[in-house]
Amino acid sequence: MRPSTLKKQQKIIEVATKLFFEQGYSETSLDQIIELCGGSKQTLYSYFGCKRGILIQVITHCTEEVGNAFQFDTESDYSLSEQLSLFGYEYLKALCSQPIIDMYRIIVTEARRDRELVEFFLSRGPHRFYDRLSEFLRSQAQQGKIILEDPALTSAQLMGLLRGNYFQDVVLGMDIPTDEEMKQYSVLAVRCFLQGYEAKD
């Protein structure tokens, strides 16, 4: 694909993202997107198929941003507690960022009439992230640092602890927690988690 085409597609995605998040997906028309980024409906159709195709790209981009928190180093010199606390902070920070909150609100709004969209979001986001964390925890179990019977369940428990009430509160319009609050909360959540699973000498 030519660089000029990629640039045009990225511009459309950026404009659509802004409009979807500001006024809602259903309330945004292709005409509004075209008005701000130029081109024609034919161009949008050729690139994305339809407005829903643009939304798919928006979801893909947003979930990749969250996915950046799920980069683990199995050979790190840091302790498991330190690694998980840092991960927890990065995960919570991404989860409570405004773009992710706006995307999640759109998913919830569209869920009743578009089950495939929800399934796509889950496969690109939460389910894939559970797998990455499970693999990391499995590697730590193999090194004798943690005791696991079900890595997938354990991952879900840890991510639930890390989300706490923060994500729910922010989705409902409460203030985004400060960096310091998220760091402290992550440390405490990981400490609680490891009390149940960390291997004892």
Image (spheres, grey):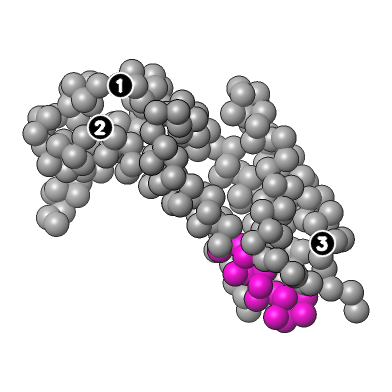
The residue singled out by tag 1 in the image is 28
Please name the residue shown 67% across and 54% down the image.
156
**160 w.r.t. 101: above or below:** below
Residue 27 percent location from the top left of the image? 33, 18
What secondary structure is the magenta-colored segment mainly? helix
Label 3, residues with CA under 10 Å away: few <14, some 14-19, many ≥20: some
Q: Is there a contact, CB below 8 Å, between mark 1 and mark 2?
A: yes
Foreground pick, 154 / 163: 154
Q: Amino acid at mark 3?
A: Leu
What stretch of residues is rendered in magenta?
132-145
Foreground pick, 132 / 178: 132
Residue 53 percent location from the top left of the image? 27, 39
Q: Earlier along the polypeptide chain: callout 2 or callout 3? A: 2
One can see residue 8 in this view: no
Q: Answer with left or right where residue 29 lies relative to residue 192.
A: left
Residue 94 percent location from the top left of the image? 56, 44
Indicate which label's residue lies in the foreground, 2 or 3. 2
**73 w.r.t. 194: above or below:** below
- 96 falls in the magenta region: no
Label 1 secondary element: loop
Q: Quadrant of the C terminus?
A: bottom right
Q: Amino acid at mark 1?
A: Thr
Please name the residue shown 75% across and 70% down the image.
148
Residue 109 percent location from the top left of the image? 46, 26
Q: CA distance from mark 3 to mark 1?
A: 46 Å
Give the quadrant of residue 106: top left
Considering every residue shown, the one lying at the far right of the view is: 201
**12 w.r.t. 80: above or below:** above
Label 2 secondary element: helix
Give the quadrant of residue 8: top left
